[in-house]
Image (cartoon, coloured by chain):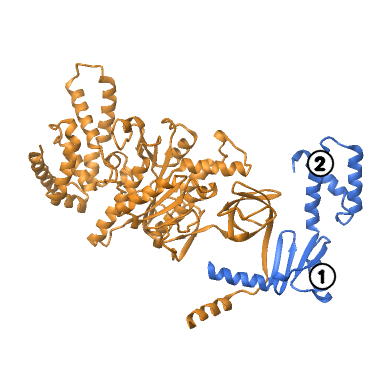
Chain colours: A blue, B orange
Amino acid sequence: MSSQFNYLVQELVRKSSNEHDFVDKNLVNEVLVGLKECKPAKHLEILKDYLAAITKKLRFQLVELEFAAEPNDSVITKLKDKINAANTLPVDFKYTVNKSLIAGFRIRLVDDVFEDSVKSRLSKLSQSFTS
Amino acid sequence: MSSITDLIRKEIENLSTDATHTNIGTIITLADGVARVDGLSKVMYNEMIEFPNNVLGIALNLEEDSVGCVLLGDVSSLKEGDEARTTGKLLSVPVGKELLGRVVDAVGRPMDGKGALNANESLPVERIAPGIIPRKSVDQPLQTGIMAVDSMVPIGRGQRELIIGDRSTGKTTIAIDTIINQAKINKQGEASGDANFRPVFCVYVAIGQKNANVARTIKTLEESGAMEYVTIVSAPAADNPANQYLAPYSGCAMGEWYMENGMDALIVYDDLSKHAVAYRQISLILKRPSGREAYPGDVFYLHSRLLERSARLKEDCGNGSLTALPIIETQMGDVAGYIPTNVISITDGQIFLEGDLFNKGIRPAVSVGLSVSRVGSAAQIKAYKKVAGKVKLELAQFRELAAFSQFESDLDAATKASLDRGARIVELFKQTASNPIAVEIQTVIMWAMQNNFFDSIDVADVNRATQSLRDYMETQGKEACELIYSSGKLEEETEQKLRSSVEDWKRSFS
């Protein structure tokens, strides 16, 4: 992001977030409408930087959970509680089934991945033979 | 059969079953062997990054929004959107005596088709140089076997001596001859059974060279029987700049292993000009700010941190040493260029090779005025120091007088004597490639020169006379040579024997 628009983009992101510092769809819409109406100079560049900043912020409030098989509700609740307890900011959860894990789960929070699956254990075993 | 299953069982038992935590990112751009990765917020500088299909990279640029990684290996299988993950490890290369006689790439993978390396140890490529406390002054000689170098710019173990000159002036030849001489001395020392003998192991790093040149170097080393003491690290011109950037550091780690284990090693970086160019290429792709001649601001640090790793260690730190012979190519003899001045200021002296001398047939084309060894004279053996002490001054005087007297017809006796002596020294120092001369023979030749044995010989015949004296001393004058070799001194008794041998040779020489 260029320093020229840095302050402006940060302000737009702040206006797109609610009182819990969570990006809100309606607020984003308001910002976009506002930008369209006043059409500032270098409108396109500002929009591009705004998109990058919002994408980054959205990533921070999303936790991706991958399971080898369809998980039951109690497992999901337990995981949710633990993640919420560890996180200061509220987060969204996204569940997927990834059969390549064979068994176990994989949690992705921004760029940190916590994995306890048969796939990761097999990969560790294969590395111990080849390294 | 059971041992194989036991091995697998043991691995499974030792395997940690805890949940793993990795830091991941996504490739956002991929160009010219450099990937820009989004994510990897916990990556360390110089950490190895794992990409799909076993491609490795090194994190070199840690920015606010992304990480710039140089990629090692085949990048054609990667694409934007691929996942990259941290490994928590710094790039390491195999080290040890298993690498002797082998040709490896910048990350230590064998490329000579002689099978796996079977090295048990590895060391990180980037390491901090030894500090002041474990270091010791240079006090042991490293004989190059080249008379012009050993007499005028002597090199000691642990020294960093730059070899600098234009293209095709014999820079690589000096380095290769030095390696060949080490192999020769090693073989001689091992055959003598001397328990105190310290062999010198060699590492030759070829950076940005044509594959044909590297192959020719390997052939020369094999033909001279030196290959068994040498490891070649090759990052040819066809290789990506990341490997060319890494190769000297990898070679240095291999050399450091000898030093840290109480042995002596010699490393040749051929050449650091191409290394700087490869680094410039990487830096520009990583969009680092460029400075003079488009090199990045830390190009001095690039070479200083590499050459500072060469050292002579104290006895209580193992007494090992790593001697470095970096090579720099100049343009039109300009030693005041950016990279040449940087490396000159880092090293403990330089051997400057002049194109004009080379073209006149004076080979090795060592320039007396511009070559210097700042610490090596302390390492010269006493016998050699005694006979070679004045030669640099005599040759420098000759060059000056020769320039002034070329239009002068009437010269005084002293000037004429200086010119005669100088012309003979020039002839004496002419030496063919791959033909190193043992230090005791060099001492004899220099002694004969200082004692006027060459004065009655025509200047045109001096080179032939030198070869003849060398052959004579290697066969019939062995006794005097052995005395010099064993004591390292030129005592009265030795000198008497030497005089009688040289007088015998003089009578037989026609």
Instruction: Name the residue nearer the viewer: B157 or B407.
Output: B407
Name the spot of residue B459 as percent of width and height, x first: 18, 31
Instruction: Name the residue nearer the viewer: B435 or B127.
Output: B435
Where, by quadrant of the figure, is residue A44 drawn? Answer: top right
Q: Earlier in the sequence, mark 2 or mark 1?
A: 2
Where does label 1 land, which residue?
A81
| Residue at disc 1, secondary structure | helix
Q: Which chain carries label 1?
A: A
**In percent of the image, x 24 and y 62: which residue is there?**
B193
Where does label 2 land, which residue?
A46
- Say if residue B309 shows up in the picture: yes
Q: Is residue B474 above or below residue A86?
A: above
Instruction: Name the residue nearer the viewer: B60 or B373.
Output: B60
Image quarter where the C terminus of chain B lies is top left
Q: Residue B320: give its label.
A: none
Name the spot of residue B456 as percent of width and height, x first: 12, 32
The crowd level at tag 1 (other Cα within 10 Å; few <14, some 14-19, many 20+) is: few
Amino acid type, callout 2: Ile
Name the spot of residue B376 as percent of width and height, x first: 33, 44
Q: Which chain carries label 2?
A: A
